């Protein structure tokens, strides 16, 4: 019996190890390519660099505008995410805990907009921002993404698991809707908030198409735009692939750090654990 259990654990560990290798391989390859010369990158028979070229990272950090683009993306993503969390939480709270006519119809309309292709919203959104003189501004980028339909859906599902008795007790104690949301509902659904925040932050941070349509000045480029313009399209380094890989590795670093600090709550949120029983 013990041998059987040991073999099962060994098999699971081996399977997880294989999947982990395949998952981590692209990032490992990217970092190793950043430490190679251009000739070594183009040589498919060479996996490890003959001598680590740490100067590639130095050039990218100090001789390129990459860090400014990273800051732009972090700033826009953080403000956008904050607004998305506020709007999604308030809408989800109203749909779940406030009784009014047409709330199910309202939720159906909100979810119906989720079925629209993102590209279908580009032209009307562009016209609206143009009429408001918000093209080529961080404000335009932020307000055009300040509501997340996915966030509304995710938080609604989490809020529906909160016992109504807790909400009624808070109201009997004289708590307003805002206090009930902030002090009762949010702590009980913390994992869902963190899951929503992490997923949408990554989406906003990696966004390329929409920012490319409404921003064109170099001072306001985000990381995806900047990486393409300065490292791929014959910009500052052209096709110097070691520098491209070094820049890509630095761009991914903030997301890895963020996930490392939030993975516990992220996994709980995916699993539907809101910290409640009964």
Image: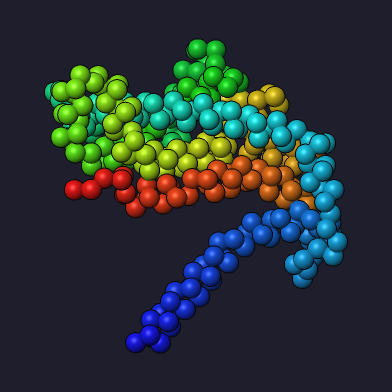
| Residue farthest along the top direction in this orientation | 132
- The residue that appears at 70% across and 30% down in the rendered structure is 68
Q: Quadrant of residue 92?
A: top left
User: Where is residue 97 shown, x and y percent of the image?
Assistant: 20, 29
**From where the camera sits, is residue 122 visible?**
no
Quadrant position of residue 205:
top right
Residue 63 seen by the camera: yes
Comparing 230 with 271, the one in front is: 271
Side of 98 relative to 150 (left or right): left
- Quarter of the N terminus within the rendering: bottom left
Residue depicted at x 86% and y 61%? 51
The image shows residue 202 at horizontal and vertical percentages of 52, 41
Report the label total: 0
The image quarter in which residue 47 lies? bottom right
Q: 78 above or below 60?
A: above
Residue 62, percent from left and from top: 81, 36
Q: Is residue 116 above or below residue 57?
A: above
Residue drawn at (40%, 79%) of the image? 8
In the image, 237 versus 195, the foreground residue is 195
């Amino acid at each position: 019996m013990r041998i059987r259990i040991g073999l099962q654990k060994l098999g699971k560990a081996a399977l997880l190890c294989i999947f982990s290798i395949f998952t981590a391989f692209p990032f490992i390859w990217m970092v190793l390519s950043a430490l190679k010369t251009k000739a070594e990158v183009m040589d498919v028979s060479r996996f490890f660099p003959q001598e680590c070229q740490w100067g590639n990272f130095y050039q990218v950090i100090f001789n390129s505008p990459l860090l400014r683009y990273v800051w732009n993306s972090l700033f826009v993503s953080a403000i956008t995410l904050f607004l998305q969390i506020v709007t999604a939480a308030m809408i989800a709270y109203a749909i779940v805990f406030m009784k009014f006519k047409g709330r199910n119809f309202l939720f159906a309309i909100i979810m119906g907009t989720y079925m629209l292709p993102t590209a279908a919203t580009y032209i009307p959104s562009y016209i609206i921002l143009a009429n408001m003189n918000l093209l080529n501004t961080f404000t335009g980028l932020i307000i055009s993404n300040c509501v997340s339909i996915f966030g509304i859906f995710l938080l609604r599902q989490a809020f529906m698991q909160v016992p109504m008795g807790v909400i009624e007790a808070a109201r009997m104690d004289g708590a307003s809707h805002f206090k009930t949301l902030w002090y009762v509902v949010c702590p009980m659904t913390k994992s869902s908030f963190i899951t929503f925040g992490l997923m949408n932050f990554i989406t906003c941070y990696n966004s390329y198409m929409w920012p490319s349509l409404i921003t064109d000045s170099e001072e306001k480029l985000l990381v995806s735009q900047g990486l393409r313009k300065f490292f791929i399209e014959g910009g500052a380094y052209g096709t110097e692939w070691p520098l491209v890989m070094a820049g890509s590795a630095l761009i991914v670093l903030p997301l890895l750090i963020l996930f490392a600090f939030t993975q516990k709550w992220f996994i709980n949120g995916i699993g539907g654990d809101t910290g409640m029983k009964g």
